[in-house]
Image (cartoon, rainbow, N blue to C red):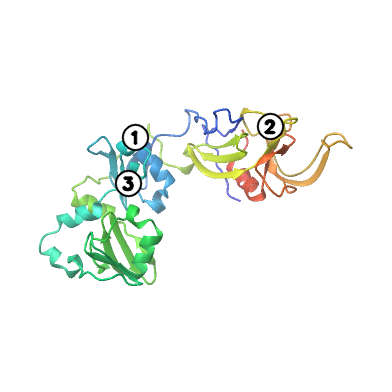
């Protein structure tokens, strides 16, 4: 079972709304959810919009460690170099796909090469041809994309994440392995039979070519060191849409349908805290002979959030979710209730 470490300042709450204009996550308490952190293993800071995107798009695995500090862009945006990309935030494009984008580090790097270096055949435009089953020609740049690299590019939103190819494939030796490499407008892809296609850690190379300072920073004691538990775990239950959202600070990490209380036995609204947790219990209530009576064994992963018996729990007797039908509890399917059990804790 995955353990959740409770920090001293961590706030874990259950927010339940009736849907009257309150369908979004409520504001998190000021004691948690930092807007700036220091990554001690990277030697750099992340903050605000760049930090938010990094947290929601794979963190170290997806984008990599930051290798520079944040810098300003013309037009009021910001940018920061990472191991794999240069991430840019463009407020002028707010609400569109291009509010965030990966910078053209491949194109910029190519522009820094000398005429002698560009005599390499990989940098020369390919002769145009009709597209083939395993190879595509891009007239915009005069280059081709083939086989495994093309398949990976297509499967991973290639135009947005990498841009168009700006070289042909070429051999690249990184110190312990030879890859088939290809440079794109926004980065570089590598391929070997052992690894398959991987995103190259091209950011430091691009930063050096653009003369960006990549020296490690000294940690400010007032800025927290990055840790996945810096953002509180809490739950938002919406009684209007019959949904539950599991929140990591301001980020939705999971959403599912639930069953809530009926008009006769409503689920209360407000902000609550987990009071009692019972892994497996026998639930019994109501008067025998009435429709309110229930007597249920093996009710798993029960987490009470009021003193009157309201709880999140697995409801094995339910076959569908997304309506009002409980005695006031929030009924969950097995996977969701197990996730909730690990996501929340006492207090």
Residue name at image x 25 percent, y 46 percent: 214
* Residue 314: x %, y % from top left: 69, 45
Q: What is the spatial separation of the Cα atoms under label 3 and label 2, in whole angstroms?
A: 42 Å
Image position of 273 (left or right of 327): left
Q: What is the spatial separation of the Cα atoms under label 1 and label 3, in whole angstroms?
A: 29 Å
Image position of 89 (left or right of 111): right
Q: Which mark is residue 267?
A: 2
Residue 70 visible somewhere in the drawing:
no
| Mark 1 or mark 2, earlier in chain | 1
Q: What is the spatial separation of the Cα atoms under label 1 and label 2, in whole angstroms?
A: 45 Å
Image position of 33 (left or right of 66): right
Q: Nearer the viewer, mark 1 or mark 3?
A: 3
Spot the residue most to the left: 115
- Whether 44 is drawn above or below 240: the answer is below
* Residue 92: x %, y % from top left: 30, 36
| Label 2 secondary element | loop
Q: Residues within 10 Å of mark 3 (few under 14, many from 20)?
A: some
Spot the residue most to the right: 289
* Residue 145: x %, y % from top left: 30, 66
- Whether 268 is drawn above or below 110: the answer is above
- Whether 197 is drawn above or below 329: the answer is below
- Label 3 belongs to which residue? 101
| Mark 1 or mark 3, earlier in chain | 3
| Label 3 secondary element | strand
Q: Nearer the viewer, mark 1 or mark 2?
A: 2
- Label 1 belongs to which residue? 220
| Label 1 secondary element | loop
């Amino acid at each position: 079972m995955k353990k959740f470490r409770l920090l001293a300042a961590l706030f874990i709450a259950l927010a339940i709304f009736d849907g009257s204009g309150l369908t979004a996550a409520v504001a998190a308490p000021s004691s948690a959810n930092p807007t700036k952190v220091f990554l001690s293993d990277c030697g750099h800071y992340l903050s605000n919009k760049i930090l938010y995107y990094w947290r929601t798009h794979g963190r170290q695995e997806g984008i990599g460690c930051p290798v520079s500090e944040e810098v300003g862009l013309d037009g009021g945006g910001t940018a920061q170099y990472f191991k794999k990309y240069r991430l840019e935030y463009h407020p002028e494009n707010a609400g569109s796909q291009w509010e965030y984008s990966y910078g053209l580090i491949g194109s910029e790097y190519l522009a820094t090469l000398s005429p002698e270096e560009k005599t390499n055949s990989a940098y020369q435009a390919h002769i145009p041809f009709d597209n083939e089953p395993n190879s595509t020609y891009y007239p915009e740049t005069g280059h081709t994309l083939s086989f495994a690299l093309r398949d990976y590019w297509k499967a991973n939103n290639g135009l947005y994440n990498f841009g168009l190819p700006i070289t042909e494939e070429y051999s690249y030796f990184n110190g312990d392995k030879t890859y088939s490499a290809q440079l794109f407008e926004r980065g570089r892809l590598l391929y070997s039979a052992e690894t398959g296609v991987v995103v190259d850690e091209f950011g430091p190379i691009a930063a050096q070519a653009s003369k960006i300072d990549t020296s490690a920073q000294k940690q400010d004691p007032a800025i927290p060191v990055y840790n996945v538990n810096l953002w509180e775990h809490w739950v938002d239950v919406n009684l209007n849409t019959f949904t539950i959202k599991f929140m990591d600070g301001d980020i939705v990490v999971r959403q599912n349908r639930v069953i809530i209380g009926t008009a006769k036995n409503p689920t209360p609204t407000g902000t609550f805290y987990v009071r009692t947790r019972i892994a497996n219990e026998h639930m019994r209530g109501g008067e025998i002979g009435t429709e309110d009576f229930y007597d249920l064994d093996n009710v798993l992963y029960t987490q009470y959030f009021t003193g009157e018996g309201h709880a999140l729990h697995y409801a094995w007797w339910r076959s569908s979710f997304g309506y009002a039908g409980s005695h006031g509890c929030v009924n969950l399917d097995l996977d969701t209730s197990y996730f909730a059990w690990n996501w929340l804790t006492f207090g």
